[in-house]
Amino acid sequence: MTLNNGTTTSQGPTAGAARTPGYAGTLAAACSAVFVAQVANALPASLNGLFQEDLHTHGSQLTWITAAFMIAVVCFEFTFGVLGDLFGRRRLVVAGTLLVAAGSSVAALAPTVQVLWIGAALNGLGAGAMFPGSLTAITAVTRTMRARAHSVAVWSGFLSAGAAVSPLLGGMFAKIGSWRGSFWVLVGLALVSTVLTLALATESKAPEGRKLDVPGQIAFAIGLTLVLFGAVEGPESGWTTLPVLLAFAIGICFLAGFVVVELGAESPIFDLKLFRNRAFAVSSVVAVIGMLAFLGACFATSMWLGPVQHQDPIRVAIPFLLLQGPTFLLIPIVSRLLHRVAPSWLLTSGFVLMAVGSLLCTRLDVTDPDLGAFVAPALLIGIGFALTVSSVTAVALNSVPLNLAGMASATTNMLRDLGFALGPVVVGAVALSNAGSAFASNLPGAHLPPAQEAAARQIAEAGGPIAVNSLPSVVPGSAAHGVALEALGSGFSTAYLVCGVAAAIAALLTAVGMIGTHKHRSGEHEEIPSTAPEGDGRQETALTR
């Protein structure tokens, strides 16, 4: 249906039509937007070592660069989904790309790590608008399961393409100039994406019954930020310190209040009725756990090669081609599999591969800089992610009627990105906590000169083993470098183990939780239902029967 102003709504598809006019342009614009958003997300991966050298950061400050981005994404993704439904998905994506341009400019000019956090947070706000806006825009111009599966697979492929290219971009500029140049390139990419979206994308809305939920948004943002603050600061500040304990306690109270608010809200940003559909509920839970495993493994790899082993940024970027590249390269295969194979099988298989790859990483030797040991585990994790990221999105979107696609899109993106946000936080907490304990236990056994041992202990208390590991050889405390390196290797090996266990749990939940949800598969051109009562948990499509 086209309005007088040229706006195409998500209602009233032509019977049997797979796509509405503007499909190709909208898909191209959506893919460019999500590519830019993921470049912004993954850019620090190859630059953590340089941030540490240039801005004199320690462990939790490096974690906050990634966490600031993901917290901004997760906290406001719900509201961005509503804004897209109310005012238009194309407008939302344009606003997001302009925010990324602004945030990248701040990051490029950052004199301190704290300013870099602000830039990362602005980038996260932009990406938080671009993820649900771009995904819902393409679902609004597809009308059959096959067309939607294909478009979701292409969208997911460009999502990972951005993550694969981003570390190479950072590493290249680190070699020829400064890490700041990579952020200026990101500014240019964001502006190009803005022009493409304005020129190619078809506007779509679904304002029926959608309203801003200000109390829910505030409660969720405060609660999640406080809980993640406690998780990031706990390893270095101490888990029993007053700020950390208060952050957890108050954050949990706000999150509980968020649930209460949403249950009584007239137009909730997080409609719990969606979870009456078992396929949607299971895919949502495993999205959080599985994506935690994936991005946790990616963050551990960037830290292992960067601040721990101090490898060249270009070398740091190489494993990320294996971690992120398969999702882009396997677009045609995954698109076909999404239609021909039950998503539960794809999800289970993908999570199993991610679990095996992460567990293989626990056998890495921190004193060995050879990248060959990363090839097999990184490729397994990358292929596993390729199978899961599109599948979990397709299951969620095809489990709800089209008039709830905006909320389902925002919810799916939020839960996936919540897993992404938790990944670095959990990995950082596990690795740095274990490394700190190992360093304190092993330092006396190193039999260092008393002055060196005292200096190393003092530096570790302030910045953790990662600070000792980065000391120049002439600085007091640098004699403990070997102890710090071994402690960090032990800590991040434990973090890889946590990622492997999380992926295995996601595989088990998928295999068991989706039994009976895919007994029947209909024709590839069957039209997706366009209307259904708000929150009707019994609504089914051919993917969920």
Image: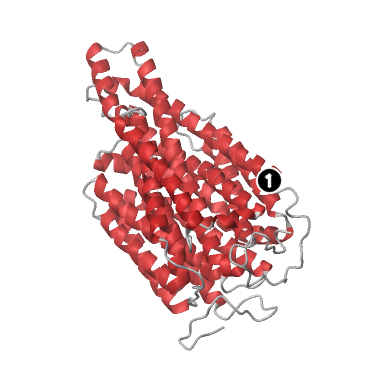
Residue at (47, 46) in percent of width and height = 318
| Residue 498 location (% of width, % of height) | 52, 33
**Residue positioned most to the right:** 520
Q: Is residue 243 left or right of residue 372?
A: left
| Residue 16 location (% of width, % of height) | 70, 78
Mark 1: give few (<14), some (14-19) or many (20+) Cα within 10 Å: some
Q: On the image, which quarter does residue 124 sit in?
A: bottom left
Q: Nearer the viewer, residue 436 or 234?
A: 234
Q: Nearer the viewer, residue 500 or 484?
A: 500
Residue under numbered circle 1: 513
With respect to residue 427, does 386 lie above or below?
A: below
State the SS at label 1: helix
In this view of the protein, can residue 250 be seen by the observer?
yes
Q: Quadrant where the N terminus lies?
A: bottom right
Q: Is residue 30 left or right of residue 456?
A: right
Q: Quadrant where the C terminus lies?
A: bottom right
With respect to residue 117, does 90 lie above or below?
A: below
Amino acid type shown at disc 1: Gly
In this view of the protein, can residue 177 be seen by the observer?
no
**Residue positioned most to the front:** 264
Q: Nearer the viewer, residue 48 or 524?
A: 524
Q: Nearer the viewer, residue 34 or 83?
A: 83
Q: How is the image coloured?
A: secondary structure
With respect to residue 158, does 238 lie above or below?
A: above
With respect to residue 380, does 86 lie above or below?
A: below
The total of numbered circles placed on residues is: 1
| Residue 403 location (% of width, % of height) | 58, 70
| Residue 531 location (% of width, % of height) | 63, 72
Q: Is residue 212 left or right of residue 457?
A: right
